[in-house]
Image (cartoon, rainbow, N blue to C red):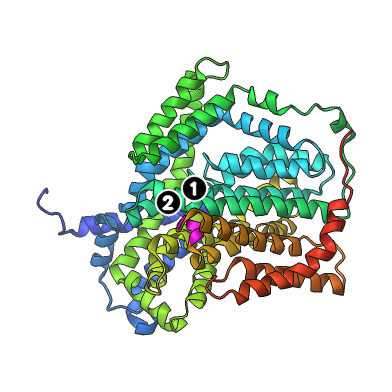
Amino acid sequence: MPYREGIPNRTDIIIGIAGVYLILVAVSRTLGTGLAAVAGLFLLHLFLGQHLPVWLAGHRGFSLERIISFLYLNDAGIMGFALGACLKYMALFLILGKVLQQVGAMDFVMGLSRALFGLGRTGPPLMAVMSSALVGTVSGSTMGNVYISGSMTIPLMKRVGIRGDLAAAIEAAASSGGQIMPPVMGFAVFFMIVLLDVAYADIILAALIPALLYFLTLGLAVWLRIRRTEVFEAPDPKLLEEEVPSVRQALMHPGVLTFICTLGALIYLLGNRNPLQTSVMLAMAACIVVSLPWRIRLTPRKLVTALHDSGRELVDVAIACLALGIIAGSVLLTGLGTKLPGLMIAWSSGNLPFLLICAFTACVMLGLGIPSTLSYLLVALLVSHAIVKLGVPLLDAHLFVFYAALAAMITPPVALGAYAAASIAKSNYWTTGWLACALGMPKYLIPFAFIFRPQLLMRGDALEILAVSLLTFAGLGAVSFGLAGRGRLTAGGAATAAGLVSGGALLAVPPLDDWIIPVLGAGLCAIPLFIHLPALIRSHTWRPV
């Protein structure tokens, strides 16, 4: 009946119960039990939350009809903004990424990285960092980044003598940065657009400096780790016979025009505040047109392959969004999104650093069981307003939660990015995960840095932004130097590492209102750097002749 909206009958409720159950089954079979368990916990809170005290987010209780009708028949539940963002934004970017693969744009990225860094022992690892950064500009997926870039860089790193677990860890840490690299930045940014009602260009502009800091610091950490590691496997002698393409040869690849024109069109259109869907469609059209004169142009068969591959991935994304609708609906119906910020502020006694640590930990813990995009959205719904109430701008709070959620991709015991890289390298998963965690340490520090230093989010005059960025990079570099220790660590080496890590953190993170803290951090870093840096620069590494 057309006039029965909002008045569900028994058939509606039965179908709703079956629909919720089938969604949980589909999530469990496609994405694992972690996300299904989290959605189940929120359902339990809906049914049993009336028995909890107020300070543990208890509510007044709801009937079965009220719960199912809100989740299944209301546009704030399963069919809410999560599924809308999936269908309006994510599908187009999935297709764009697959089209770029089909027309050879990713081949250009790998060739340029190889030309710039060569085949020395430090070459392929730095090539992994650069290629993952470039692939991340259009991919926005950690797992996709690992498989696109890692399938070439990990075997190449092993051929120059780098252990499999270290090679996999480098690729995992580099690929996990793909979701923070503008302009795509993964699917979470589309949820951010909906939640904040801000322009896409504003988000990618604010995220630019943190992303550059991450990849620059990661490149330094990889270089330091390779230079300071004592034991390597023997390099592949056949590698000496391979020719490294020159930069000119790499730039002559047909994929260069496709990549640059597509990325340039996307950035230009977004910068002019065009609608996101229009920008992606026009960028895809530019990609297809530019590829036409070349042998690797987009043929009908390649287009079908791109649509097929993106469609398969979209199914998993849509199922995850349906589960997220259950979670979001539960939060809205119980009022948890408005209650929890007040409770967390009370728990933290209004202390912003403590609240940030709690939010970061919550993101990492959720990310151990559910995809990083969903853990970002869940914590953003529950915690971001509490952070805002303590004086942090809303966009800054969401970017903080976004970074924290992505840290789970390289944080054991799950660390899906490290797992994917370890499967390619045939290495030990646990060793790979912890090495990736150490190499990707900037991802744990940068979000705290831009909360206390808004200049990192492009706020302030140009000189101030540059000075703060350089100071933060110096601190992050010191932390990377401290963590890039040798296999056998003496008492003196441990003290040196502790001084560099603690001093670098004080230099990179705290507010700059009190100049004593950065000066103290610089002092803790100065002596170890003065002792070890000259020897490091003079150290010998194998290079092909």
Residue 95, horizontal then vertical, whole percent: 46, 34
Element carrying mark 2: helix
For the C terminus, give its image quadrant: top right
Q: Amino acid at mark 1?
A: Met
Whether residue 326 is visible here, answered yes or no, is yes
Q: Considering depth in this image, is 499 or 123 the residue closer to the camera?
A: 499
- Label 1 belongs to which residue? 185
183 in the magenta segment: no
Q: Is residue 107 above or below residue 408?
A: above
- Using the numbered discs, state the Cα–Cα distance from disc 2 to disc 1 in whole angstroms: 10 Å
- Residue that numbered label 2 is attached to: 203
Crowd rating for badge 1 (residues with CA inside 10 Å; few <14, some 14–19, many 20+): many
Compared with residue 240, is residue 320 higher up or lower down, i.e. above or below? Answer: below
- The span shown in magenta is 455-459
Q: Residue at x 85, y 44 (%)?
A: 161
Residue at image position (71%, 63%) is 478
Does residue 308 appear anywhere in the picture?
A: no
Examine the rendered structure and indicate whether residue 118 appears above or below residue 212: above
User: Of 46 and 545, which appears nearest the observer?
Assistant: 545
Q: Give the mark toward the camera: 2 or 1.
A: 2
| Residue visible at 40% across and 68% down in the picture | 382
